[in-house]
Each structure stands twice: as structure tokens, then as C-alpha cells.
């Protein structure tokens, strides 16, 4: 009968991995190597783990920030189980930043300017005229120009940014560690930026000119009002939540292992 040759799983450089099962004898994470999960769950169940200098498991999802109008992705679940382990392993339990919030709505239009004052006529007499005298109609008061339209309303505030993703939940269960250290780094995703404020509303139309009875000259329509101010930026979204970790290294327990008793027996 042929003997089975144990097969090792080796991480050299950066490798995206989501499962290293018991079909592998040992998991090697070499010096400066990183096992990436891209925010997906990771399950490791091997006989032995060997971590080189600066070896890491990193759950950061791709892209520092989620797409606009999208919550950040969480770091998922990292479950690492082995009979023995040695070396120093960083576990970067990170969530993705939240997406930018929606833009605010536009402001309303400004009101129309006031109508100009009405012109007035009068009579003018000329005593130089013989007999009945000369009388003519004149413009006693010029009609007023229309008033300027009102400024448009300020744009509405941008909507709040989307929440960042939760950090990864981490469970490490090593039955017999030998000079083995786990360094968890918990980084929930930051909240997304608030949406930009809405555009200011258009200025109102100028007021109508005042009525101009003959022989008064016509007045002008008022100027249009200025556009409204841009609305304020919306509030930043909330950060993700820090998820629990459990490190069971031999008889030593670190973190919230009560919640994971079924995984660390």
C-alpha cells in the first residue's frame, strides 16, 4: 500500500484565499506574505500553521470605500483551527468604508419682483396762449421699474453617508501552540461622506413695469433674482461596529470566547 504524502498550502506574496481545509497538512504563511479574504469568510482547518516574519491574514474588502449609496462590506468571519502553530501572525480584521450619501434636492424658485408704481399724468397750462389759453397733458410722475426678483431658496442638505462595514469576527483555536503569537488589528470601516448639498433654486423673475399712461414713457421690467445658495453637505455616516474576537491558544483564552464555545471545543 502506497503511503500518502502530506500536502502543504503555501502563501507567498499576496494570495486571495477563502478556505484551507483538512486535506492540507500544514499552512505556511511565509515572511511578508498576506492571505487576503476580500471580506469573505475564511475557514482554516489544518494540522499545523507556520507563520514567517510579518505574516498576515487581511480581511479588508477590495476598494477602500464602497460605491456611492452603498454600505461598506464587513470583514466576514475568520475561523482558524490547527493542532499546532508557531511564529507571529497578524490578523487585520477590517471592514470597508461606507459609500457617499445622495445629493440633496434643489431649492425652490424665488418669488417674482414687485410691480413698478403706476405713472401719473397732469395738465400743463400756457398763459401765453390767447383767449382760452393752451392746455396739454403731461407725465406728472414717471412709472416705476419692476422690482428685482427674490433670491432662489437654498438647496436642501445632502443626505447622510452610508455606514462603514463591521470588522471581521475572529476565532483562532490552536490546541498546542509553540512560540505562537496572534496580533489582532480591529479596524471597522469608517462612515461614508455625506452627500453634497442640492443646487440653489433659480432667482425669481423681475417684476412687471408700472403702468405708463400716455404720454409717460414705458418703464423697465425688473431684474431677475440671484440663484439660491448651494445646500450644506450631509452628515458623515456611522462607522462599522467592532466584532468580537476569540483566541484560544492551548489553555489560554483571550477575548469573547463565551460566544464561540461551539467552535473552540
Image: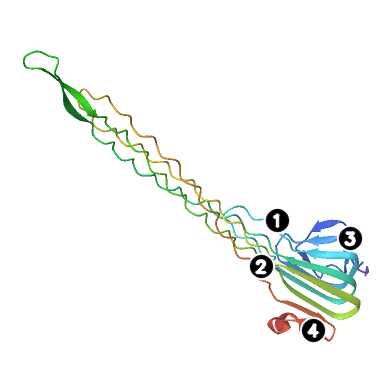
Q: CA distance from mark 1 to mark 2?
A: 14 Å
Label 4 neighbour load within 10 Å: few <14, some 14-19, many 20+: some
Kindly state the secondary structure of the residue where label 4 is placed. Answer: strand
Depicted 42 relative to depicted 123: above or below: below
Distance from the alpha carbon under mark 2 to that under mark 3: 26 Å
| Residue linked to disc 1 | 64
Precedes in sequence: disc 1 or disc 3: 3
Q: Which mark is residue 32?
A: 3
Crowd rating for badge 1 (residues with CA inside 10 Å; few <14, some 14–19, many 20+): some
Give the foreground label among 1 and 3. Answer: 1
Mark linked to residue 235: none
Q: Position of residue 119 (x, y in %)?
A: 23, 31
Question: What residue sits 71% from the left and 66% below the top?
Answer: 41
Q: Is residue 220 left or right of residue 177?
A: left
Quadrant including the C terminus: bottom right
Q: Is residue 80 above or below residue 248?
A: above
First along the sequence among labels 1 and 4: 1
Circles 2, 4 touching at the beta carbon (< 8 Å)? no
Horizontally, is 249 left or right of 241 in the view? right
Number of the front mark, 1 or 4:
1
Determine which residue is flagged by label 4.
253
Residue found 24% across the figure and 25% down from its top: 216
**Image coords of residue 57 (percent x, y):** 80, 65
Q: Secondary structure at mark 1?
A: loop
Q: Which residue is mark 2?
A: 166
- Location of residue 244 with respect to 205 vertically, above or below: below
Amino acid at each position: 500500500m502506497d503511503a500518502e504524502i502530506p500536502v502543504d498550502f503555501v502563501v507567498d506574496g499576496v494570495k486571495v484565499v477563502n478556505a484551507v481545509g483538512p486535506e492540507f497538512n500544514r499552512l505556511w504563511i511565509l515572511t511578508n506574505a498576506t492571505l487576503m479574504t476580500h471580506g469573505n469568510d475564511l475557514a482554516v482547518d489544518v494540522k499545523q500553521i507556520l507563520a514567517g516574519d510579518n505574516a498576515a491574514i487581511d480581511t479588508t474588502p477590495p476598494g477602500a470605500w464602497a460605491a456611492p449609496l452603498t454600505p461598506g462590506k464587513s470583514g466576514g468571519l475568520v475561523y482558524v483551527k490547527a493542532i499546532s502553530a508557531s511564529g507571529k501572525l497578524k490578523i487585520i480584521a477590517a471592514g470597508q468604508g461606507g459609500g457617499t450619501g445622495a445629493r440633496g434636492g434643489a431649492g425652490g424658485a424665488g418669488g417674482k419682483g414687485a410691480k413698478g408704481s403706476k405713472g401719473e399724468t397732469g395738465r400743463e397750462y400756457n398763459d401765453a396762449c390767447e383767449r382760452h389759453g393752451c392746455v396739454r397733458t403731461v407725465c406728472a410722475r414717471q412709472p416705476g421699474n419692476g422690482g428685482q426678483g427674490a433670491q432662489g431658496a437654498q438647496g436642501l442638505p445632502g443626505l447622510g453617508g452610508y455606514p462603514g462595514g463591521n470588522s471581521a469576527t475572529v476565532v483562532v483555536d490552536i490546541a498546542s501552540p509553540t512560540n505562537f503569537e496572534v496580533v489582532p488589528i480591529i479596524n471597522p470601516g469608517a462612515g461614508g461622506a455625506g452627500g453634497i448639498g442640492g443646487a440653489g433654486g433659480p432667482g425669481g423673475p423681475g417684476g412687471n413695469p408700472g403702468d405708463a399712461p400716455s404720454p409717460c414713457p414705458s418703464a423697465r421690467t425688473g431684474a431677475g433674482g440671484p440663484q439660491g445658495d448651494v445646500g450644506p453637505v450631509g452628515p458623515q455616516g456611522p462607522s462599522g461596529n467592532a466584532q468580537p474576537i476569540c483566541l484560544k491558544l492551548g489553555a489560554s483564552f483571550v477575548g469573547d470566547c463565551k460566544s464561540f464555545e461551539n467552535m473552540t471545543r
